[in-house]
Each structure stands twice: as structure tokens, then as C-alpha cells.
Amino acid sequence: MTSTPRHFTNSRTTNFYYSFLLLPPEKRRAIEALYHFARQSDDAADIQPDPAAGAREVEHYRALLDRCYSETAARLDDPALEALREAIRKFNIPRQPFEDLLLGLEMDLRMDAAAIRYRTFEELELYCYRVASTIGLIAIEIFGYQNPQCKDYAVRLGKALQWVNILRDIQTDARRGRVYLPTEDLDRFGVDPKRLADGCYTESFIHLMKFEFERARGLFDDARRLRPPEDRRSLLPSEVMAAIYRRLLRKIQNRAYNVFGPPVRISRPVKLAIAFSVYLGMDGFR
């Protein structure tokens, strides 16, 4: 019998919370532990005063992974990490997605150190895979699935979710020196990346955002096509995330693509309504 707390994250301000709201207790505990690890490692790397300190934090989390995957390590003092170790064993979660996730954090740190930018969307896709698709690949092991195509679905949906994050957070990221939008897209539409931090809401920016909006919608459509019908029930938490993020995307469109100023958000009641509508059988990709 474990003495660890029931919940490691119950913040209703997160979109992730609503996706595992109705999971069975054992799976909910596992997915919360996954979210906690991803969130804590990201925050620990981000808040450091310089990239070198951030890199040391990433190495710290690699060492914690060693303990989570060790057959001989003593019980972990951190309840969330102990729950993650239990989940890894219970659901036979492979280590590689966790390693790729940490590589994604290192990509951010390299951007901080050298103002690296992505030239093409294809280059950016690797980053989206590492920081988002990896979470999906781990999550489906917890949810359970029959068709191996679920892995392709998880990868594509993760990229779609991360692309919405990138579009939503353009100004916030730019203010800390991170511009994720591909250089070739910025050049194509004549948008100066140096002006994003100040809020360059121009006709050129609107045309750029319309282009990126369609790319995001295409990623969601690809994920929907890859979703195996026989695994739809087990993938309901993922569909909740898809529905919430598609609503965010629509909200960006309804604001005439103005992602500057007040954050683009969805209220808690609306998130809750979306979650329950998906669980009641409505298509999560609408």
C-alpha cells in the first residue's frame, strides 16, 4: 500500500488537467506523475540564470530517470517520482521518450545561449516531437491501445498541440529571446522577428498567422486520420486535449490572429464542458 498523495497536479489552469479528469484512479495517478516530471524538469531548466545552469538541471533529471528505471534503487523520497517509477513498471513505459523530452529542453537552452532559430518547419518538427510528441508516446502506454498506429497518432497530435502553443506564445517567447516560427516563413511574409517581442500586429503578421493557422489545422487533421477506430475509447483523454487546443486555435482566429496583449485562454467552465462532451461521444477533433 502506497502512502503517497492522490494527486501531484490538480491545477485547473492547465489544459492537461481536463484530459485525465475521468481516468481510472491508477491511470490518473500515472499520468499525473508523468505531467509532474515534464513540468518540473521544464521549469527547473527555464528558471536558471544561464544556459549552463539549465543544462545541469537537465542532467539532474536524467539522474532521476536513472533511479526511476533502476531495479535496485531505494524508494524515492519524492512521492511524484516514486509514482512515476511505479507507472514505468506497471505500464512498461520505454525510456527513450523521456530521453527525447530532455533533449528537447536542451534545444531550448541552446536557443538561449546562441539565439538559434529554426530555418524551416521541418527543422522545427524535431523540437515539437521532443517536447510534445514524447508526452503522447508515454501517455498512450498508460491509456492502453491495440493498434501500433496509435504511436503515429500520438506523434502527430503532439506536434499539433505544440504548434498551437508556439502560435499562442509568440510574444512571451520572443521577450525571452526565443523565436520558434521558421525563418523561411518570417521571410516569406516580411515579418521582422526582432519586432515580435513588441507586438508587431501588421498586415504582414496577419498573413503569416493565417498560413500558420492552416498548418496547425492540417496537423490536427493528420492526427485524426491516424487515430485507429478500435482505440478511440482508450484515446479519449488525447481527444480532450485535441478539442481544447482546437478551441484555442479557433480563439486565435476569432481574435483576427492578434496574439499580442492579453493571453489567449479558455475559461475553466468551457474546458470542463469540452472534456465532458468528448467523453459523452462527441468528436474531439471538431
Image: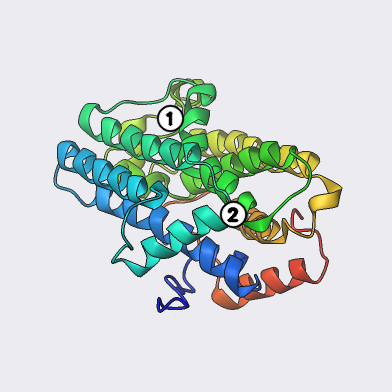
**Amino acid under label 1?**
Val
Q: Position of residue 75 (x, y in %)?
A: 33, 63
Quarter of the figure with the C terminus: bottom right
Q: Is residue 185 left or right of residue 241?
A: left
Q: Evaluate whether residue 263 shows in this view.
A: no
Please identify the quarter of the rendering in which residue 220 is found. Answer: top right
Tell me if mark 1 has few (under 14), some (14-19) or many (20+) residues whose alpha carbon lies within 10 angstroms of its own: many
Tell me if mark 2 has few (under 14), some (14-19) or many (20+) residues whose alpha carbon lies within 10 angstroms of its own: some
Q: Is residue 58 left or right of residue 187?
A: left
Q: Secondary structure at mark 1?
A: loop
* Circle nearer the N terminus (1, 2): 2
According to the image, label 2 marks what residue? 91
Residue 49 drawn above or below residue 238: above
Residue at the image point whose x is 66% and y is 61% from the top: 237
Q: Secondary structure at mark 2?
A: loop
Q: Position of residue 129 (x, y in %)?
A: 52, 35
**Residue 157 or residue 66, whichever sits in front:** 66
Residue 78 drawn above or below residue 143: below
* Nearer the camera: disc 1 or disc 2: 2
**Amino acid under label 2?**
Phe
Residue 265 drawn above or below residue 182: below
Q: Evaluate whether residue 212 shows in this view.
A: yes
Give the numbered dot on residue 191: 1
Q: Position of residue 256 (x, y in %)?
A: 58, 50
Residue at the image point whose x is 61% and y is 64% from the top: 19
How far apart are the two marked residues, 1 and 2, measured between alpha carbons?
46 Å
